[in-house]
Image (cartoon, grey):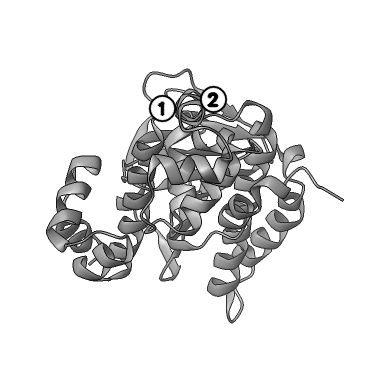
Amino acid sequence: MTMPWDTADDLTTALFHVRMRGAFYCWTEASGGAAVEMPRIDHTLSFHIVDAGTAWLEVDGAAPLQLDPGTLALVPRGLGHRISCRPGGPLLGRADQLPQTMIGDSFSVLRIGSHDADPEVRLLCGVVAFDSPAVEGMLEILPPVVDVDADEYPVARALLPLLREEMAVPRPGGSAMATRLADLLVLETVRAWIAREEATASGWLAAARDPQLGRVIAAVQRSPGHPWSLETLASVARMSRTSFAVRFTEVVGVAPMAFVGQWRMRVGRGLLLRGDSVAAVASELGYGSEAAFRRAYQRITGETPGSVRRSAR
């Protein structure tokens, strides 16, 4: 029996079994109309899940977004933004620079506003970086803010109470448990967004669902270092070279070989952040020399491989 996802098994694996390269979570309790600034952090995804009360998310150039209990909002591409109890509330400063209680290397508790009053809002905030070129590519095509209602990710209804309990009653291993629960919440939200946007997906995400183009997307993801050419890509799609080039460009928005180059750089960035040498990455991605890879990387991304490796440190 053929299932709807069968043409995108590699994409499913890439997105549903993502690996987080780095994550920091903050359980926040706020009152008094307080607002905090979330700084810009490139190549990350910020998120906010409201447990109780109503929060407001403000991104420059967009109307404030109301977040009710159970709602989760994603802010991709590391965009800076504000989170508050009410729009235009007094800004207390950057969230990462305010006094907070650390309960582990990657989890903190932040209480802001009036300490004499019950919190107006309880929410989980976080910043996540993914060790997955597929997710990196997905973040590039997301709008500035993505909100997902609790009904769209039912797993959250079970996870949020567990996370709240870990925050309220500290126990041995609480930091590890809280971090794992937060990881699951983020992954479930990515899945919910994919399911919701399947019919309107654009770019390579749309191509991955096409019976012919999907084979090409999967092949490039699986073997980015293969010596791809327009001819070999067209043969994978079982189309003529001209028809394939036109259709691929229309659906994805870039020419086939441009997509190959971009995907190689996404993979390369992940390897560089992992600590692999520039020479090793060049060889892995099929470049004849380290110099050739350096030139291609800087031309496509605007960064140098060395700057990426230094940022990892």
Q: Dot 2 surroundings within 10 Å: few (below 14), some, or many (20 or more)?
A: some
**Mark 1 — residue?**
59
- The percent position of residue 137, horizontal first and vertical second, equals 44, 43
Residue 197 or residue 58, whichever sits in front = 197
Q: Earlier in the sequence, mark 2 or mark 1?
A: 1
Q: x%, y% of residue 133? A: 43, 52
Q: Quadrant of the C terminus?
A: bottom left
- Work out how far the residue at label 2 is from the one at label 1, CA to CA, in angstroms: 9 Å
Looking at the rendered structure, the secondary structure element under dot 1 is: loop
Q: Is residue 126 visible?
A: no
Q: Is residue 38 left or right of residue 171?
A: left
**In the image, which disc is placed on residue 65?**
2
Quarter where residue 91 is shown: top left
Instruction: Tell me what residue is drawn at x 60 percent, y 54 percent.
Output: 10
Q: Quadrant of residue 211?
A: top right
Q: Secondary structure at mark 2?
A: strand
Residue at the (55%, 50%) spot, across then down: 218
Q: Is residue 154 above or below residue 65?
A: below
Mark 1: give few (<14), some (14-19) or many (20+) Cα within 10 Å: some
Whether residue 253 is situated above or below residue 284 in the rendered picture: above
Residue type at mark 1 is: Val
Q: Is residue 30 above or below residue 14?
A: above
Q: Residue at x 55, y 74 (%)?
A: 176
* Amino acid type at mark 2: Leu
Q: Are marks 2 and 1 in contact (CB under 8 Å)?
A: yes
Relative image position of residue 55 (x, y in whole percent):
56, 34
x, y percentage for residue 67? 60, 32
Q: Is residue 103 visible?
A: yes
